Image (tube, coloured by chain):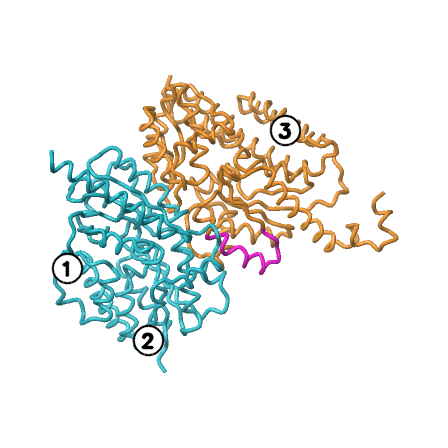
Chain colours: A cyan, B orange
Amino acid sequence: MTVRLGIPAALLYYLHYPAWHSFFSALGVEVVTSGETTRDILDLGIREALADACVPVKVYFGHVMALREKVDYLFIPRMVCTNGETTYCPKFLGMPDMIRHSLTDLPPIIDVRLDVREGWTARWQACRQAGRALGADAWTINRAFFKALAAERCHHRLLQAGYQPPEAIKIIVHGRGGRRTGPKADPPGDLVFAVLGYPYAVHDRYISVGLLPKLRKMGVRVLTAENLPYKALMRQNLDFDKRLFWTYSDLCIRATEYIFKKGGVDGIIHLTAFGCGPDSLLDKFMEMKARKQRSIPFMSLTIDEQSGEAGMVTRLEAFVDMVRRKKGAAKGA
Amino acid sequence: MPKVTFPHVAESYRAFKMLMEDLGNEVILPPRPGRHTLDLGVRHAPEFACFPVKILLGTYLETCPQGVELIITSGGVGPCRAGHYAQLHKKILHSLGYQVDFVVFEPPRLYPLDFLHNIRRLNPHRLSYRSIYECIRRAWRKLQALDDLEKLSHRIRPREIKRGETTRTYRKVLAWIDQAYTWREIEDASISARQAMFSIPQDPYRLIPRVGIVGEIYVLLEPASNLEIEETLGHLGVEVERSMFLTGWTRDNTWTETTEGLTVKDAALPYLPELLGGHGRDSIGNTILYAKRGFDGVIQLAPFTCIPEIVARTILPRVSRDYNIPVLTFFLDEQTGKAGTATRLEAFVDLLKRRKSKQVGSDGIEGLSWHRRRIGKY
């Protein structure tokens, strides 16, 4: 019987799952994910996690609980820094410890630490550590490492081609590799919205209350921070004394600046989770930016574990109508 | 003379005021944060920003109308949000029409040139580096004297015979320290202040539980933000030891790490090997150290939505179980009321006293057999 490794489908999953999947599959391990978030998973998470934590963290706890009995190992990496400059949110840094010390009856946790500031072999070292923990030999680990790199590149390319992370994951993991997939055909829609926020909130259909499908239904094409050209974002000039410390927040604020500079977007929606630490600053900065440059309407949506469908739809409809009228008026004049 | 101000952190403003005036600045003293400060801060700060942001912004908004030109504050290198506060406050104050500038002190270990540059900006008297060093040394001595007195007040307050006498004496001796200027004067004031504190009549036979306080630095240091928790506990008959003082923290973060800081790090290692920014790891490490030193309980103070403290709070129940030490957590924000906090504290202190009297046996009343209990009371 092969070893079963569980990867909770939350937080870092959306941007890193293809690489992890290829890596562990190449080691001959059966990779199990917890699937999409459901009411049950969220309830489990709410019961186990601290009340003051943000929804995504509670959801993560729920996913771990859902996987707990089904797998032999849990993969909860400690991602500290992947680009050499910014780190992830402190909750990510302490995630393996939070899980280990607050849940019981857990299978062994593989918590490799990845900090690329430690040297250029950091990624390889982390992979080797994870492979060793599963008892693989050096040669297999090396091969798996390069497969993981390839999968990551492929994932990145798909995102840049306009796919959203869940679609890209489906193509890479379940499809015929992403190599032959061309750029995504634009769905119909007269408006283009940028939905900015952290991938684990925007792309989780349960906690975002189906924000993206709802927008598509209203005839709105959606761009997320992952679809914007990454290199251009990193070159973006910000009028900040200090770069934001957190990788995803940094990406979001850069995306905002980029969109205000480039245009071509009719509205910006910032999706934030209740009680999110970095977002308290990020949202204020984005709001100030939007207030200064009035060219693009901006709305900030807060979600929590009690978010209702109806309230969300009303706000979205109002925003879409407002943008549509503004656009029509601009055209008519 | 440029008008400068700085955040209000407990009594430390007395030392900072002296330093800034020595360097030739006009100091606009920050008022003690109160209801009005909070209202101002809450109105203009982001909703989910942590409590210190709101208090600091409120303080700035109270001092800015008096013509402040420079605000001196500390920075940070993350990943705690505190490192971005200066930037956030600057943007908010500018958008409200106050053209103030900020001098942000980053850890000089990492940015030595920035540090010197900042010092030069705050030095309109053009003092030499040597005399600046002398000024800093004197301010530092004053800060130490203030911290010592505060520590002493935590020890004496639960044992005082006349309730409220410690607080009164403490207020009185603070003024002595405040007036001292030269090195000799500060030393003398410090000594006589200690003597005055020790001359408060005390009851040495009380059963005094000892409680350690851990958590985020600002809510720990500023009594106005934590509802004077140390004073409340002192009046409940509990000796408090706080894990952080301004002098200790500054030394750990500017020069080299003290052995004290390293011990805390080592203690927390089995539970939290990663540095989260803020004081998450210190909270865990200090809790363990307090447990090892035989304290009766630990209270964690954290601002609402503080990320490192949330991580620490998730791990603390395990620490509490492993080391058999009760831990109580307060998440503080502008909605926290004094009465609710006091009730929770009273319940916690009752629990500690009961536990202690059971442990102590012969010392506590409950450890005595029934016919001797009355004797114990007399």
Residue A184 has which mark? 1
Give the mark nearer the N terminus: 2 vs 1. 2
Between B187 and A63, the residue placed more toward the observer is A63
Question: What is the quadrant of residue A41 in the picture?
Answer: bottom left
3D distance between C-alphas at marks 1 and 3: 71 Å
Q: Whole-percent x and y of residue A73?
A: 40, 71
Q: Chain of mark 1?
A: A
**Magenta region, residue range:** B311-327
In the picture as drawn, the residue positioned furthest to the right comes out as B371
In the figure, A45 relative to A23: above or below?
above
Q: Is A108 above or below relative to A296?
A: below
Q: Where is residue B203, by image quadrant?
A: top right
Count residues near mark 2 (Cα–Cα under 10 Å), then give few for <14, some for 14-19, many for 20+.
Answer: some
* Amino acid bearing label 2: Glu
The residue under label 3 is which amino acid type? Tyr
Asked if the magenta segment contains residue B318, the reply would be yes
Let me know if residue A213 appears in the view: yes
> Which mark is in front, 2 or 1?
1
| Nearest the eye: B85 or A312 | A312
Between B358 and A271, which is closer to the camera in this rendering?
A: A271
Between A57 and A81, the residue placed more toward the observer is A57
Q: Mark 2 falls on what kind of element?
A: strand
Q: Position of residue A121 (x, y in %)?
A: 27, 61
Give the residue pinned by disc 3.
B170
Identify residue for label 2.
Answer: A30
Q: Position of residue A94 (x, y in %)?
A: 42, 56
